[in-house]
Image (tube, coloured by chain):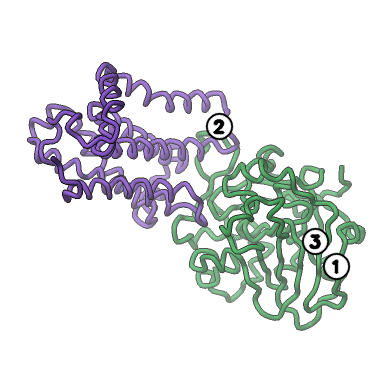
Chain colours: A purple, B green
Amino acid sequence: MRGWTLQRTTDARAPAPGLATRINGAMRRVPVWTVYVLGALPALWLFAQAATNTLGIDPVREIEHRLGELGLQFIVGGLAITPLRRIVGVNLLRFRRAIGLIAFFYVLAHLAAWLVLDMGLLWRQVAADIWKRPYITMGMAGFLMLLPLALTSNNWSIRKLGGLRWRWLHKLAYPAALAGAVHYLWLVKAWPVEPFLYLGVIVALLLVRAWFAGGGMSRG
Amino acid sequence: RLSYTPSAYSTDEAPNTFEEISGYNNFYEFGTAKEDPRNNSRAFKPDPWAVQIDGLVERPGSYDLADILGGVALEERIYRLRCVEAWSMVVPWIGFQLSALLDRVGVQPGAKYVAFETVTRPEEMPGQRRAILDWPYREGLRIDEAMHPLTILATGLYGEALPNQNGAPIRLVVPWKYGFKSIKSIVRISLTEGEPPATWKQMQGSEYGFYANVNPEVDHPRWSQASERRVGAGLFAGRVPTQMFNGYADEVAGLYAGMDLAKDY
């Protein structure tokens, strides 16, 4: 990654450097905890709706699907940070850990909703489903890939692992994102639009990354 | 309000509410989300309505719905409904046995299957504006399944005419099969010699068979059919075991004697 974390955003190729610089200036004053607060709002909203029984006719499915979709949305958000910085020059790197951790917590909550509300803790069926159902296998694989990332999303782990190894480990975010999108696509009947959108956006973000990593845009 | 008599074929399980039954539907003609059929079916006009009955019948023709209903006595049939997606409900249908209609039009001896078709009206059914399925929706039954007393054509729900989103004005209900067999808003019934096309089978034959009998031992390739979630049971209700033939084994198991239900799924 050529030590890009140390570079100033003004060095990045930015079609509108003026605006990007102003956004970066403003974002520098935003404390990271606001991201955690904003990230928790959809969960609080969902909880309030569940408590007041306003989640529609099948609240179990609604809770499960919304948590999964929120997980995917924050994963997309996390994956968008580097391309955003490289292409537009907006630097949100400070918020990436928070976004990643929020994504993980939504995926964890999605998994818990499946286990408790949907499967009713029928462990034998749960085990059989994880083993035999490709879309569930894929979802579990995605979760297991996110787990070490969440556990090492702290400064102590970065020091302990060393920057290079830590960054290598955190490339697991890419296959995890793909697993999440395929998991969604694999469970639907027929071919509705949304799962394709998630998969398409994730693949596009990964391609942008691969293009930069391959030196697709030479830097001055 | 419809007038009808109760039926010995009804389950004594508590039915789902009208709101649940009419607000949570798979009817892709109106969209793929469960709420789409209720939200997108207001412009649908189930009146006037006629059903084309043709193929191997003695008296083919276009039968007006009023004409069809003039010849039958309506019953309330409270049936379990098991969706292939592993959720279920209990529904108080109002309808009459399909066999009554087939007897009236006269089934020719060579007829072995009954084919059904849903109406095609993309102007009233926004889901049909996309080729998400191969419209019109088609389904079929073997003749003995069609003549079985549990098999009904429903025209009502909770004592009222069928809501648009539930397949107004007339739909099939085959309670021992997955819900997708129970085709909605029927405009054509054909008696045939060969097995008729079925939309989901044509789309994904490895997942959706012609028989589609509810069977906890034969899984959908992508998910288990061993248990189901009863819609409306509450957040922490968990799952209930799925019953063979959706609990109608005593009545219908004989239809499939000698068949390998893992092969003819």
Q: Mark 3 points at which residue?
A: B97
Query: The N terminus of chain B lies in which quarter of the figure?
Result: top right
Front position among marks 2 and 1 = 1
Query: Observer-nearest residue: B240 or A170?
Result: A170
Residue B230 position within the rendered picture, expressed as x and y whole percent measured from the top left: 58, 43
Q: Is B118 situated left or right of A13 in this image?
A: right
Residue A66 position within the rendered picture, expressed as x and y whole percent measured from the top left: 46, 36
The label on residue B62 is 1
On whether disc 3 and disc 1 are found on a single subunit, the reply is yes
On whether disc 3 and disc 2 are found on a single subunit, the reply is no
Q: How far apart are marks 2 and 1 (CA)?
A: 44 Å
The label on residue A55 is 2
Q: Distance between the residues labelled 3 and 2?
A: 37 Å
Q: Pointer 3 indicates a residue of which chain?
A: B
Task: Indicate the secondary structure of the residue bearing disc 3.
Answer: strand
Task: Find out whether the residues at labels 3 and 1 contact each other: C-beta distance under 8 Å.
Answer: no
The number of numbered badges drawn on the structure is: 3
Type of the residue with mark 2: Leu
Q: Quadrant of residue A67?
A: top left
Type of the residue with mark 3: Gln
Residue B112 position within the rendered picture, expressed as x and y whole percent measured from the top left: 71, 78
Which residue is located at x 28 percent, y 36 percent?
A15
Using a 10 Å C-alpha cutoff, classify the residue at mark 2 as few (fewer than 14 neighbours), some (14 to 19) or many (20 or more): some
